[in-house]
Image (tube, helix red, strand yellow):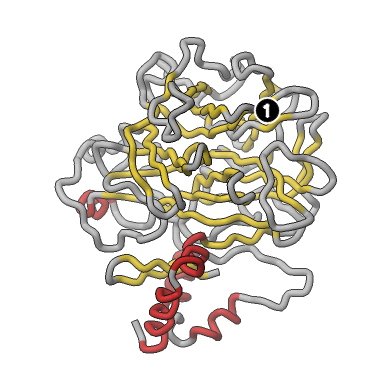
Amino acid sequence: LCYLEHSSSRLFFSISLLSIFFTDFSFSFLSIMEIFKPKLCWVFMVLCLNLINYNGVEGFHRILPEYQSVSATSIDPDHRTGYHFQPPMHWINDPNAPMYYKGFYHLFYQYNPYGSTWGNIVWAHSYSKDLINWIPLEPAIYPSAPFDINGTWSGSATILPGNKPIILYTGLDTEYRQVQNIAFPKNASDPLLREWFKPDYNPVINPNKYMNATAFRDPTTAWYGKDGFWRVSVGHKRRNRGIAEVYRTRDFKTWTRGKHPLHSAADTGMWECPDFFPVSLKGTEGLETSVNGNHVKHILKVSLDLTRFDIYMIGSYNAGKERFIPDATSVDNSTGLRYDYGNFYASKTFFDEKNNRRILFGWANESDTKIDDIRKGWAGIQVILFLYVLSITSLLLYSLFCVYLVCSDFYHFKHLFNLLNYGL
């Protein structure tokens, strides 16, 4: 799958090889290259180099004191994307709590308001009508209480019955333990959700004394069971075993840890940013996160801290035992299926009830050095993709950019193919 970005007078290519398998395999990446040869041969070479080398994710959760508060004096417009999301300036990493609420799409994200490297992290917030044109708002969540004074890290949103949004996120408390906190909108009638408050009873989920409190983060969107409990998964690591813990609650205030993890795998390291959701076996429409039954499969996605890329597993969810069981053909280690074989990490999906689809955001840190990021005045983008089921063995992702072009302005495609025909 090739998705293309046109930004001002520049044309940028980003190729993402997806693990796509068909029962009758009649489509391949080579067929794409045949269409565009020889103009894209150089792109293929760059892709190969990217696969060989380290993903380029530099400085993640690592403070660089000399750089973290170097504010941008000017913004270099070169190479800024025209369709994938990025704020006006400075560093971003994980996408957090995407949702659709009262006519607007919302995206929160890990953000440094003072510089273009990781540090000073807050939950920045932008909203959009179309997922393409975004308007920034003031940060929604920032360190301010004992339960998050040393960090407000990643988390997810859940829309409760009655169209009530809540956010679960990881805070670093006064002892630098990673704990899970809850936040509510101050004014639920505000469609822009501009202000959020954190109740004093936080944290709502603490690591127990046997757990590694420095590796316990990134709660998922909650799903509702027939037993009347809501559940979330939280990423964890015990020794070198990656774990997706599971917790249940009725009121989002008192939580009980499951007897067993949702899933775990040896020698995979810390599982960051878990994502757990159903996909339909009967069509291409997305499903709300709580849907379960014989007509669905479940996806468990984790971000591997050891390798800095995302993998996903396809399998079944046993609600009674609170366990995810990967299919026999689905691998739960670094050789497993990936959404994207480039620089792509910490992805998060949400169900778009307006269009009955599931949408995926993923962080692309690109590969610039920190000095280059400071010079540019910004670092990182959020890649936006549609997510669909192709078969029971893999997923197919569509770029929102391509859909946007087809629906809104065919001229861009015509111009694009002219460029390919006559050379870049």
Q: Which residue is denoted by mark 1 in the rendering?
A: 231
At 42% from the left edge and 39% from the top edge, which residue is drawn?
A: 109
Q: What is the count of numbered marks?
A: 1
Q: Residue furthest left?
A: 73
Which amino acid lies under the numbered mark 1 shown in the image of this protein? Arg
At 39% from the left edge and 37% from the top edge, which residue is drawn?
A: 125
**Taking the image as drawn, is residue 148 in sight?**
yes
Q: Is residue 33 above or below residue 209?
A: below
Q: Is residue 361 left or right of residue 424?
A: right
In which quadrant will I find the C terminus? Answer: bottom left
Q: Is residue 359 above or below residue 138?
A: below
At mark 1, the secondary structure is: strand
Residue nearest the observer in this picture, 26 or 165? 165
In which quadrant will I find the N terminus? Answer: bottom right
Q: Is residue 254 left or right of residue 188?
A: right
- Can you give x and y, in whole percent of width and height, for residue 308 in the image? 49, 49
Please tell me how crowded label 1 is: few (under 14), some (14-19), or many (20+) other residues with Cα within 10 Å.
many
- Can you give x and y, in whole percent of width and height, for residue 49 in the image? 45, 68
Q: Residue furthest right?
A: 294
Q: Residue furthest top?
A: 200
**Taking the image as drawn, is residue 239 in sight?**
no
At 44% from the left edge and 16% from the top edge, which residue is drawn?
A: 147
Residue nearest the observer in this picture, 4 or 116? 4
- Can you give x and y, in whole percent of width and height, for residue 226 in the image? 79, 28
- Can you give x and y, in whole percent of width and height, for residue 366 in the image? 38, 56
